[in-house]
Image: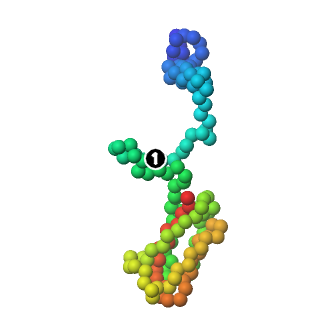
Amino acid sequence: MTPATCCGCGWGFGNVGILTAIWQWILKMLGIKKEADDVPQGLQVFDASGNIVLDITDRLTRVLGEVNTGAAAGSVTDAGLSSGDPWYIAFRVDGAMWSSADADLAISISGTTLSWSYGSGTAQNMTITYGVY
């Protein structure tokens, strides 16, 4: 008997291969067929009682980077922005809450460029975290 066969039959399944072949034959005989498109993808997390506590079967986010605005208008180009649907979030660098005296921060994304500008008021140094999902 050679190492490539498990029973000397010469089919070359090997120990694991023969079980896979038998399983595929059983599924075929029962009419059970799994296509790649039929198999769901994602992440499900369950608690000890079997309840779903997290179900992500669509998309996950990817952080591409962070940029500090320096309290001035500007832009950053990142080719990764074209690899999905972009998102962003901005926070004051000093950690303070937004105040009515602060200038509004306008953020836009066009193609691979993320741009920001300030309206009237006191421009604050902001950190913009951005990415795609």
Q: Nearer the viewer, residue 7 or 61?
A: 61
Residue depicted at x 60% and y 22% = 29
Query: Does 77 sit above or below residue 122?
Result: above
Q: What is the quadrant of the C terminus in the image?
A: bottom right
Query: Does 58 sit above or below residue 115?
Result: above
Q: Report x, y in % for residue 122.
A: 47, 88
Q: Nearer the viewer, residue 70 or 108?
A: 108
Residue lying farthest to the right in this orientation = 111
Instruction: Give the quarter of the image for residue 84.
Output: bottom right
Residue depicted at x 34% and y 44% = 48
User: Residue 74: in sight, yes or no?
Assistant: yes
Residue lying farthest to the left in this orientation = 48
Q: Is residue 99 left or right of residue 21?
A: left
Q: Report x, y in % for residue 93.
A: 42, 76
Instruction: Give the quarter of the image for residue 32.
Output: top right
Crowd around label 1: few <14 · some 14–19 · many ≥20 (10 Å):
few
Q: Which residue carries the number 1 mark? A: 44
User: Residue 21: in sight, yes or no?
Assistant: no
Query: Does 102 sit above or below residue 92?
Result: below
Residue depicted at x 35% and y 43% = 49
Identity of the amino acid at label 1? Gln
Residue depicted at x 51% and y 15% = 6
Query: Does 40 sit above or below residue 7?
Result: below
Which SS class for mark 1? strand
Q: Report x, y in % for residue 66.
A: 49, 68
Q: Report x, y in % for residue 91.
A: 45, 74
